[in-house]
Image: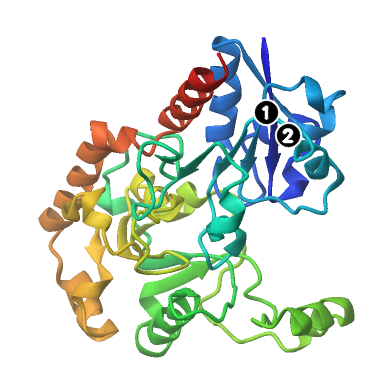
Amino acid sequence: MKKIGVWNYYEVLNTNNYLLLNKDAGVGDNLLEPLNQLYIKGKHNNIDFMTLDLIDNFNDMDGFIFFDFPRMTNKYVKKVFQTDSPKYLVIFESQLIRIDNWDAKKRVFFKRIFTWSDDIENGKKYIKLNLSQKIIKDIKKDISKKKKLCTLIAGNKKINHPLELYSKRVEAIKWFEKNHPEDFDFYGIDWDRYVSSNKYIRYLFRITGLSKMFKPNYPSYKGKIDSKKDTLEKYKFSICYENARDIPGYITEKIFDCFFAGCVPIYWGANNITDHIPKECFIDKRDFEDYKSLYDYLTNLSDDKYLEYIDAIENYLKSKEAYKFSAENFANTIVQVISDDIN
């Protein structure tokens, strides 16, 4: 049995194989499913994936794989880079969140890099690997079960970057609250507290408890949720913005969360989204000059036309194209590449 060490940038997930054996990452629905599938697929192919804290002798390992570039100050990570074993990087986060993923000088540490980026993948060192999830192929189509017109599910964050879409979510929320509050609810974490893009202010507010005192007022905010799918199923449409726009291939679980719930996404994010997902499956926010024109389109859409979106979504989820975003493809791709390298 070959042994491969595993480490995630979000270190809370790494203890005692947690990210390999549990589906829940604390946010989202089944976000760790691809890593669970990787662990199972590895066992079937004579590879034992294990978190770094379970390793006795780092020099006995056949390789190491990192999910996003790690913190180099971590004691386990230091031990990895003292070995000659091959190292692999899987890029999850964009340059807005984990800039080290995109530092060319740091990429030289890795034998191969798995990435969703359509700009750098080449099938050699840079292997195309979409952000993945468990694909649900059968979805609910009963429009009568829809509680309200539109929703949004996201955490409250702020980042100073020209491509960020966090502020655009806030614009959508404020427009609906001002113009059509009866047609809109939204959910997520940290909307009941003040959030700053400045890390020092964030730290100050966190240790002093001031974030609650200066919380913004969002009348349409309905709190945290246990299940995205159960919540999205109650709405016809969802504001579905990635954390960043115009990054080719950056397609996260957000649009798939909508698909699985039979909720039509209003999408804004990857500028080449239609290279991967048919345009019939979503409403492209870029097609509307303002929220009034978008709202008019949503409210004037016939039930028959709405069901055309839902049918297109279901057909896509059952297609080979959707498989490219599946947890199974994620596991198969990584195991195949590593097996070819170390055997």
> Residue 312, position in %: x, y?
18, 45
Residue at the location (35% across, 55% down)?
A: 119
Depth check, front residue: 41 or 124: 124
Residue at the location (55% across, 74% down)?
A: 221
Mark drawn on residue 18: 2
Compared to residue 249, the image places residue 335 above or below, namely: above
Element under label 1?
Answer: helix
Question: Quadrant location of residue 212?
Answer: bottom right
Let me know if residue 31 appears in the view. no
Question: Quadrant location of residue 103?
Answer: bottom right
Mark 1 Cα-neighbour bin, 10 Å: few <14, some 14–19, many ≥20:
some
Give the left or right position of residue 49, taking residue 117 as reference. right
Give the left or right position of residue 335, taking residue 48 as reference. left
Location of the C terminus by quadrant is top right
Depth check, front residue: 92 or 188: 92
Element under label 2?
Answer: helix
Mark drawn on residue 21: 1
Q: Amino acid at mark 2?
A: Tyr
Depth check, front residue: 13 or 336: 336
> Residue 202, position in %: x, y?
75, 79
Report how far apart the C-alphas of labels 2 and 1 lie in the structure.
Answer: 5 Å
Mark drawn on residue 120: none
Location of the N terminus by quadrant is top right
> Residue 215, position in %: x, y?
69, 85
Callout 2–callout 1 Cβ contact below 8 Å: yes
Let me know if residue 156 appears in the view. yes
Compared to residue 214, the image places residue 312 above or below, namely: above
